[in-house]
Image (cartoon, rainbow, N blue to C red):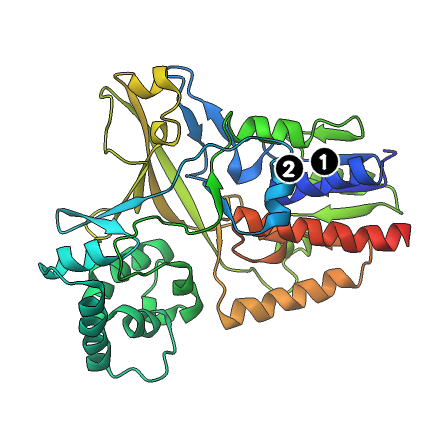
Amino acid sequence: MSAKFFIIGAGLWGAVMAERLASQLHLPVTIFEKRAHIGGNCHSQLDPETGIECHIYGSHIFHTSLPEVWHYITQFTEFTNYRHTVLTKHNGKIYSMPINLATINALYNRNFTPEEAKEFLQREIAEAKIAAPQNLEEQAISLIGRPLYEAFIKNYTQKQWACAPKDLPKEIITRLPFRTSYNCNYFTDTWQGVPKDGYFNLFKRLLDHPNITIELNTSYAKIKDQLPKDATVIYTGLVDELCNYQYGPLAWRSLEFSWETVNVCDYQGTAVLNYADLDVSYTRIHEFKHYHPERIEPFNLAKSVICREYPANFSPGLEAYYPVNNAQNNLLYERYAEECAKTQQIILGGRLGKYKYFDMDKTIADALNTFNALQKEIVG
């Protein structure tokens, strides 16, 4: 093996690093990917029966307010003008998510103005008497009051994380928007959309460089003893696995997906419908044709592809999706990161390698920042 840089994982972080090393430093790079495809969890493919573009590991909507990220990624794809909205089902009724004025009025059967809603919820919050939130449950109640929390957050979170919200860190809830206007857009970033010709083609372009070699169906364990002694390994896999679980396993949540082709043109009227109650075991249903209404033929077809998403306990051999970023796990990760830092030829990256819940734009930003630091070391 002649390449100096070996990247473990062909997901977004690894693909950006490979592209930068190959195009900017003109270095040979080999990527080893354990799956049978590039793109990591962003991977998409056309359903052979319907022609509908499906996100194989759950819905991925690109959104960012970072100009450097937008400038970078739009070199490789054009994005649609898709704007993400989500609905949620609670007690047999459909509500708008994230929680906004429409959600509030529907749950309370009121007709609040924005100011009236703010005043009403302040009274709800005050009744809870939570001065210093210590966990996800207390943080959520201190933001939206107990009734909204119990309707839309409590049981969904219980399903997602397989533990009571009061046992989860309060920081998790900061990802969920909350508004007292009728703005139902899930994201408010400057740029948003999905790749016009799909994520798979985005990754093909990212990695289409003569200096990049890709080996699919190849795990790091399979080839690590064959790498040259002076190789730099850019590792985007599980860091505890890399260190042979020396300090014990890090906690993750996994997912399982159940696919179905249905004989209707439109199954649920939206790309994502959440299920907030415990009597439904899945957390959401994805209907992928809604991401590309501009693709007239598959969009109007009298068939649709849906995917039910089920939270799952993680164990080695399954896919890790969500890090459980409580204090105990974060300290454990720091021990692993310090262990890897002893070897200057290992660079950790991506959601798995850094044990962080990165959005796609933050993944790209972190990869670009890591590359820039590496470039300074190499070029001087």
Q: Is residue 295 left or right of residue 22?
A: left
Could you tell me the amino acid type at mark 2? Ala
Q: Residue visible at 28% across and 60% down? A: 153
Residue topped by disc 1: 31
Numbered circle sitting on residue 10: 2
Could you tell me the amino acid type at mark 1? Ile
Numbered circle sitting on residue 97: none
Q: Is mark 1 on a helix, strand or loop?
A: strand
Q: Please say if 104 is above or below 305.
A: below
**Pick the front one: 181 or 228:** 181
Q: Residue visible at 77% across and 47% down? A: 233
Q: Are marks 1 and 2 in contact (CB under 8 Å)?
A: yes
Q: Residue visible at 59% across and 71% down? A: 331
Is any part of residue 280 visible from this angle? Answer: yes
Q: Report the quarter where the N terminus lies.
A: top right
Image coordinates of residue 210 in percent, x first then y, are: 79, 26
Q: Would you identify the image quadrant in which residue 272 lies?
A: top left
Image coordinates of residue 106 in percent, x first then y, are: 14, 55
Q: Please say if 299 is above or below 70.
A: above
How many numbered callouts? 2
Q: How crowded is the residue under tag 2: few (<14 C-alpha within 10 Å), some, or many (20+)?
A: many
Q: Residue visible at 59% across and 63% down? A: 248
Disc nearer the start of the sequence (1/2): 2
Q: What element carries label 2?
A: loop
Q: Is residue 193 left or right of residue 153?
A: right
Q: Report the quarter where the C terminus lies.
A: bottom right
Q: Distance between the residues labelled 1 and 2?
A: 7 Å
